[in-house]
Amino acid sequence: MMRQAIPAFTGMRCLWLSYCAFLLVLCGCASDSTVGPSGQTRGRSSLFGSKGTPWTIQCREQGGPLRAEHVKQIAETLRQTAGIRPDDVFVVDGSDGIARLYYGTYFRRIDRKSGKHITPKKLRHDLDLIRRLGTGPGELYFFHARIVRTPTPDVGNPLWSLSSVDATYSLQVAVFEPTENFWEFKQAGAEYCKLLRDRGFEAYYHHTDSCSMVTVGSFGPQAVYVTGKGVQVLSREVTELQQSDDLLKYNHLNGSVYRVKSSEGTMIPMPSRLVEIPKRQGSEPW
């Protein structure tokens, strides 16, 4: 932690039709709100205009029981630093048990020629400034600061959050990721979870800053076992669940069955897969 004497830093049939309609709304349309530094939505303009999508600078992250308090102290000191815009400093205590300090909101577009994100001059300048801040000569406090997508608030019924399940594994059936014209990936994950719940499945969602995963079922360690030849095999309970419905048979990415190219050049659908259930203090399951 920083020394207290330093006042500032220096330097995711009928049901299927409903599903398609749901995806059309969530994955095919632009948002009518914008994201502010706090991660909350504001205004009525689209996120996806000529400006691009919102990114921010992740300055620092910390785990532990006092993570939020410690990071908020650092944030307050950062707000008092010369050259820093106080209103652009914000803290998010994530559901993964990590508190993160962010700075600024910057809109980035994809360059049509290179296919890469364009980094605005202001973002480059602020990132350099943040990285140079320290508590003394040679002590760069935010040296590992990096550009990340602006975090969005978690949504969904908290009782359906995967991290609250007391089990070892769950069956991953869908993942929603942000794209240049689709930012509501957490809303999509939560809504798809509800769709499966309405169908009668034990569905859960798990949000991160980069994607929202949807799973079905909860299993103990016996859900997977290793044969005498060292091959991992799913239990009968898991395979029966996979085969019980077309929506559970394969993995979906942003509403479409996820496929990979085989050695013969054909596109093969990837089956749903067993993942470890993340705990609040644990790491990501993929």
Image: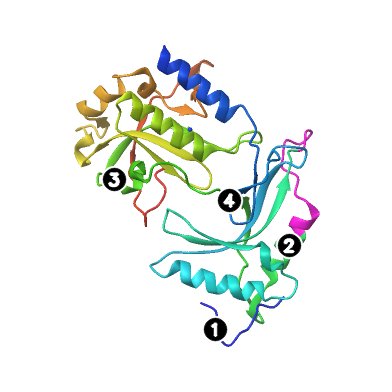
Amino acid type of the residue tagged 2 in the rendering: Asp
Q: Which residue is mark 1?
A: 3
In percent of width and height, residue 126 lies at 73, 62
Image quadrant assignment for residue 131: bottom right
Above or below — where is 98 with respect to 111? Answer: below
Amino acid type of the residue tagged 1 in the rendering: Arg
- For discs 1 and 3, the disc positioned in front in the rendered view: 3
Quadrant that contains the C terminus: top left
Which sits earlier in the primary sequence, circle 1 or circle 4? Answer: 1
Q: Which residue is mark 2?
A: 126
Residues at marks 4 and 2 touching, judged by CB atoms closer than 8 Å: no
What residue span does the magenta drawing correspond to? 111-124
Which sits earlier in the primary sequence, circle 1 or circle 3? Answer: 1
Front one among 122 and 221 = 122
Number of on-image labels: 4
> What SS does tag 2 mark?
helix
Above or below — where is 23 with respect to 81? Answer: above
Q: Which residue is mark 4?
A: 40
